[in-house]
Image (cartoon, coloured by chain):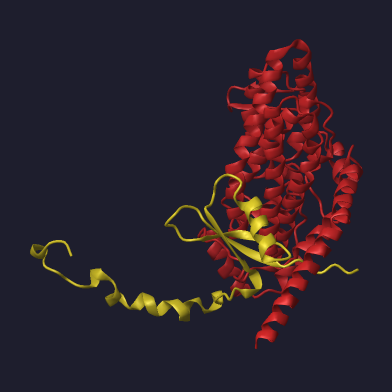
Chain colours: A red, B yellow
Amino acid sequence: MYTQALNARDTEAGAVEDADRVAAFQARVDAEEKIEPNDWMPEGYRKTLVRQISQHAHSEIVGMLPEGNWISRAPTLKRKAALLAKVQDEGGHGLYLYSAAETLGVSREELTEQLLSGKAKYSSIFNYPTLTWADIGAIGWLVDGAAIMNQIPLCRCSFGPYSRAMIRVCKEESFHQRQGYELLLEMVRSSEEQKEMVQDALNRWWWPSLMMFGPSDTDSQHSAQSMAWKIKRFTNDELRQKFVDATVPQAHYLGLTIPDDKLSFNEATGHWEFGEIDWDEFMRVIAGNGPCNRERLAARKKAHADGAWVREAAIAYSRKRADRREAARHAAE
Amino acid sequence: MTEKTTPLWEVFIRSRTGMAHRHCGSVHAADAEMALQAARDVYTRRGEGLSIWVVPSSEIIASDPAQKDELFEPTASKIYRHPTFYEIPEEVGNM
């Protein structure tokens, strides 16, 4: 569900490429034609996509961890079933995305290695802890809400496999946001104490959610090229503003206060204006020093290592069966 | 022990009776049976299908996009293959 547009752009590659091919490629993109895996594409386009799609996939996979933390402690069977289904969806979304990235010539093993070695990034939001049950609601409402803002324009991305994966993801994502908001609504209506838990969750998740849209446009080095390639359709700040405009009234409906004393509605523009994001915190989390970065990576590494014998056994079994089929065929001849 | 690469399979799903199987993505799996199970889990969590095909990705032979013109242009010039090429008087009625 989450890309954060952290990619540094590859520029050098374009210099050595045939100008005619680059121009023909750009013309196809400009004509809103989808680019497919076997089509010629500039190296920078391929690299940008591999990084963006794999980063998006890693985010889905790591995103299972903070929510998985609450599956065994969900307050009712209904909430447990919903959370299980949601976490399973995140795993599925990761797999759709890995499969889209692989069409660009990178292997699943390489992508996994990049995540586990810490070379690849994933969305900063998953490095925050889920301390109370209200956090599960806040993630659905805010984190999935922000993800939907990001992903709807990606359905029109110029790269066919990414755009098709995004269409599937978006179809499934709406349930994620709705179950979160409904959960919070039930809590704020239940008791003062539970309402306080929800306010506390909003206080902790609000700013990290705004950071999900990535650096501000003035600091985002790659936006222009990604827009020209029609990988991105809106800038980080445009998407962030859309999210704030959609979310503030939803918070008010819950009877909550957005933790930003600069927040005010501008009658003239029709937009909610908000305070400055703590970019130092953002950079700290991206650099690997958020509250849970080490824990998340350690959990992924453990899962991968613990599953190694299963992968090996499955391959060994498929070999054994293939050998037996081969032997039976020889015997029959 | 060095880990071997898990094979890649392309997944095709028939959404309703009477429809063709349609490509929807890929999965990694050690063998065909596991590929079918993985495809079911990954691509049909909400009643998307009635039938699944999985095909080893390495078995798919694709045409070269660079040969698009020579492969497909000739069909564009054969307008006599289309019904609208032939003139039938209106009195004859729908044909």
Number of numbered discs present? 0
Q: Is residue B5 visible?
A: no
- Between A260 and A252, the one lying in front of the other is A252
Q: Is residue A49 left or right of residue A267?
A: right
Residue A89 spot, x, y in % from top left? 67, 44
Q: Which residue is rendered at x = 62% and y = 53% of the image?
A: B40
- Between A24 and A124, the one lying in front of the other is A124
Q: Is residue A106 visible?
A: yes
Q: Which residue is rendered at x = 50% and y = 53% of the image?
A: B15
Quarter of the image that includes the N terminus of chain A: top right
Q: Which residue is rendered at x = 42% and y = 57% of the image?
A: B18
Quarter of the image that includes the C terminus of chain A: bottom right
Q: Residue furthest top?
A: A192
- Between A265 and A248, the one lying in front of the other is A248
Residue A62 spot, x, y in % from top left? 79, 46
Q: Which residue is rendered at x = 91% and y = 68% of the image?
A: B1
Q: Is residue B11 left or right of residue A128?
A: left
- Between A248 and B23, the one lying in front of the other is B23
Is A182 located above or below residue A302 in the figure?
above
Based on the displayed image, in which of its 4 quarters is residue A284 positioned? top right
Is A123 located above or below residue A50 in the figure?
above
Q: Is residue A167 left or right of residue A224?
A: left
Residue B24 spot, x, y in % from top left? 57, 58
Based on the displayed image, in which of its 4 quarters is residue B12 positioned? bottom right
